[in-house]
Each structure stands twice: as structure tokens, then as C-alpha cells.
Image: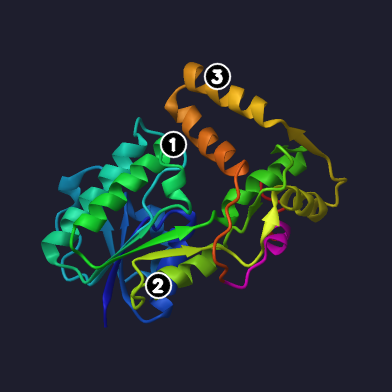
């Protein structure tokens, strides 16, 4: 039985990944900052490893007897004084160094679709830098490039709950986000996949107007979409860059950049966004 280390178990994707690896018959070790964070996933975890990716000393031995390392480590909102470079780059690099010591058979890392086109963004820059380190490591690897998570689309649902949604430009740029359960299958299947880079999205290819319309309809509300000219977006981002911290600016910069470009990835899975919205209409 092959053994896998799952880093990022407490995130949206990680909880699905640890379940999928267990479903496929792998022995699983899960990394967490404390036991309570992964208590709800105990039935899918064979061994818990308590440590912090930002503290290399706490990771000693984390890859011992491990065959595959999976990491979706990254921050969506900066907190605890940590930066993207601290976590998305250095944290994953600390894991990689432990993996190299033990000579694991494969390292699977989750990045972002179109990362090469957005490497000027601070959060994406940190991911791309780690990708470079992984490619130079001489380990067998797969980098997964998902086209946004369903959980990210909850921003649209929140806008709809407030009675109005916003898009940039015409709102006709397209995206096909993917459900965590579908993406988890792709990640686990990557163990046996020969592809070093796997780009993937969900089965629904939608414009931002269509996503907002779906969100309003799931709530039974009248559709109200406000279209913001691209020049206002550019001015807003420039102002944020000057007057706010990276903690505030980073997530907004990423979100507003994605809204203004096509993000169309190869399709996979069975879950539909409209069903996800219906399942989450009561979540604040």
C-alpha cells in the first residue's frame, strides 16, 4: 500500500483530497498545525503530523516512509503576519526539502490556471517561484492548474444576497470553475498520470453574467447586474496598490484580474455550479 502525505488538509480542496486518497486505497498522513483542525477527517487519516510549513524544524521526519507528497498549501487571505512568500513559496519549499531527503516517488502541487499570465501578482508570483524549485528538484512531479474553486464562486452568491452584482466590462469573459470533489479526483489520479502539468476546470463554462444570474436565481431574486468599465477597475487597483497593505490588496488584485480575462480550462467532473449555489444559500 502506497503512503501519501497530504499538506493543506484544512483548506477547501484538502478535505476532499484526503478523502479521495483514502477512497483509492492509499495510507494517509495529514499535516496540520494542531489536532483539532483535522478532527472531523479522522476516519480518512491514518496518521496525523503536527507542524507548520513555515517552521522547517517542525517538519523533520514528515516524509519518512512516504511515497507521494501532495500539497495545496497556500494562503487566500494574509494573516498572522505571514506573506505569500512565507507560505506559498517558502512553506512549500520547506516541504520539498523534506521530500528530497526521503527520495519520495512523486510530488503533486496545486497551483493556479493561467499562472504564467498572472505572475506579476504577488500571490501568483510566489506560486510560480515554487513551481520553478519543484521543476529543478529532479523529483517526479505533477503540477495541477485548477481554474478556480466552487468555493471562490460564493463571492457571487454574497453579492446576489445583497441585491446587486458587479462585473467588469461586458461581463462576458468566461470561466469554468471546478468542485473540490472533482478536483480531488484529478489530484489523486495524478499519482499514476505521466503528465507533469495538468490544467483542469469544471463542466460548466459560464460568463460572469451567467454566474451572477445563476446566483440570483438560486435565491429567487430579481437579477441586477452592474457593469463597471475596465478603466475604473484599473484606477481602483492602482489606488489600492498605493494606499493599502498587501494583506488587503493581494486578494482583491487577484479576484479583479481574473474577472477581467477568459479562464477556460479542459473540463472534468460531474458537479454543476447551480447545484452548489442551492446547497449554500443559507451560508453567510
Q: Residue furthest top?
A: 243
Which residue does the image show at 17% across and 71% down from the upper left?
65
- Distance, label 3 to label 2, CA atoms, is 42 Å
Which residue does the image show at 72% across and 32% down from the upper left?
228
Which residue does the image show at 19% across and 61% down from the upper left?
99
- Distance, label 1 to label 3, CA atoms, is 15 Å
**Which residue is more in the foreground, 24 or 36?**
24
Which residue does the image show at 57% across and 61% down from the upper left?
178
What is the magenta range?
269-278
Q: Residues within 10 Å of mark 1 (few under 14, many from 20)?
A: some
Q: Residue 203 appears at what percent x and percent y?
A: 63, 67
Q: Is residue 271 magenta?
A: yes
209 relative to 6 in the view: left or right: right
Residue 188 is tagged as 2
Q: Tell me the quarter of the image containing the N terminus.
A: bottom left
Residue 239 is tagged as 3
**Which residue is more in the foreground, 170 or 25?**
170
Dot 2 lies on which element? helix
Q: Residue furthest right?
A: 222
| On screen, residue 226 above or below 130 | above
- Pick whichever of labels 1 and 3 is earlier in the sequence: 1
| On screen, residue 134 above or below 165 | below
Mark 2 vs mark 1, foreground winner is 1
- The residue tagged 1 is 121
Amino acid at each position: 500500500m502506497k503512503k501519501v502525505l497530504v499538506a493543506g488538509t484544512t483548506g477547501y480542496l484538502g478535505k476532499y483530497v484526503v478523502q479521495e486518497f483514502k477512497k483509492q486505497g492509499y495510507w494517509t498522513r495529514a499535516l496540520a498545525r494542531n489536532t483539532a483542525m483535522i478532527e472531523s477527517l479522522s476516519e480518512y487519516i491514518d496518521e496525523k503530523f503536527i507542524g507548520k510549513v513555515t517552521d522547517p524544524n517542525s517538519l523533520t521526519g514528515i516524509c519518512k516512509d512516504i511515497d507521494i507528497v501532495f500539497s495545496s498549501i497556500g494562503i487566500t487571505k494574509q494573516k498572522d503576519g505571514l506573506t505569500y512568500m512565507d507560505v506559498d513559496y517558502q512553506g512549500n519549499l520547506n516541504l520539498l526539502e523534506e521530500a528530497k531527503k526521503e527520495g519520495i516517488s512523486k510530488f503533486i502541487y496545486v497551483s493556479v490556471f493561467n499562472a504564467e499570465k498572472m505572475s506579476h501578482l504577488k500571490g501568483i508570483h510566489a506560486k510560480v517561484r515554487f513551481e520553478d524549485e519543484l521543476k529543478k528538484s529532479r523529483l517526479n512531479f505533477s503540477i495541477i492548474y485548477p481554474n478556480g474553486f466552487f468555493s471562490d464562486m460564493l463571492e457571487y452568491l454574497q453579492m446576489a444576497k445583497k441585491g446587486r452584482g458587479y462585473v467588469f466590462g461586458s461581463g462576458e469573459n468566461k470561466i469554468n470553475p471546478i468542485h473540490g470533489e472533482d478536483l480531488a479526483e484529478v489530484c489523486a489520479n495524478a499519482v499514476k498520470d505521466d503528465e507533469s502539468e495538468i490544467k483542469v476546470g469544471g463542466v460548466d463554462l459560464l460568463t460572469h453574467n451567467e454566474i451572477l444570474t445563476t446566483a440570483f436565481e438560486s435565491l429567487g431574486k430579481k437579477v441586477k447586474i452592474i457593469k463597471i468599465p475596465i478603466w475604473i477597475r484599473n484606477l481602483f487597483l492602482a489606488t489600492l496598490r498605493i494606499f493599502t497593505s498587501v494583506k488587503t490588496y493581494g486578494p482583491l488584485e487577484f479576484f479583479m484580474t481574473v474577472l477581467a480575462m477568459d479562464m477556460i480550462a479542459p473540463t472534468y467532473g460531474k458537479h454543476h455550479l447551480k447545484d452548489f449555489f442551492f446547497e449554500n444559500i443559507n451560508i453567510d
